[in-house]
Image: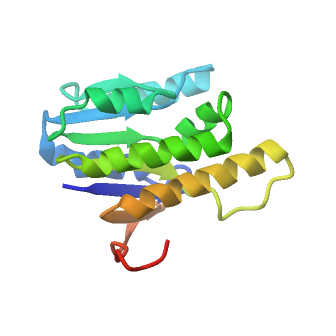
Amino acid sequence: MGVTLIVGGARSGKSSKALELARPYAERVWFIATGQARDAEMTERIARHRDERPASWITLEAPIDVAGALERVTDDHCLIVDCMTLWVSNCLEVMTGAEIERLAADLAASAARRRGLTIVVSNEVGSGVVPVSPLARSYIDVLGRVNAIWSDVADSMLLMVAGRALEFPARSKHEPA
């Protein structure tokens, strides 16, 4: 089935588009959630996202261990990973950028080998102002490279802007990354 990467800004419709793409798979959908409820606002966001998903979908909470969660997913079912943005943030607390990128490459390769559709959600954060903080700059750099890693294996890529999707053609195997 392949990998679909959905990128865009905050509140651009990425998660809604992922749900839309997965709905035809009915009860054969797994959802790997990377968010952590560290405060009341995030708790509310997670609850809202959870309420948008059909109860029959299987949800795995994996703030860092997406690889372990991926091993549990039925190979021919649809999988949504939402999202790389929070995953990179979580990982930066315990890993270096290089370690995160290696792990992302392994995850992307595993996803590309799956028989079922894999939908990966991530924010596009490289279009804004360069932050003054070294940690924020590192985060943007690592997330940008992680997005490029997923883009390399993606059969399709969507850029979400204000709830509308712009589809990018698949990268030719001969086109440089």
Left or right: where 136 falls relative to 22: right
- Image spot of residue 25 (x, y percent): 14, 43
Q: Residue at x 66, y 27 (%)?
A: 94
Q: Quadrant of the N terminus?
A: bottom left
62 or 65: nearer the viewer: 65
6 or 149: nearer the viewer: 149
- Image spot of residue 165 (x, y percent): 38, 65
Please say which color scheme the image uses: rainbow
Q: Residue at x 43, y 48 (%)?
A: 121
**69 to 84, vertically: above or below:** above
Q: Residue at x 32, y 65 (%)?
A: 156
Q: Residue at x 22, y 29 (%)?
A: 57
Picture quadrant where residue 76 is located: top left
144 or 111: nearer the viewer: 111
Picture quadrant where residue 30 is located: top left
The extreme right residue here reads 132
**152 to 53, vertically: above or below:** below
Left or right: where 67 falls relative to 35: left
- Image spot of residue 107 (x, y percent): 41, 43
Q: Is residue 50 visible?
A: no
Left or right: where 74 falls relative to 155: left
- Image spot of residue 123 (x, y percent): 54, 52
Q: Is residue 74 visible?
A: yes
Counting the numbered discs, the total is: 0
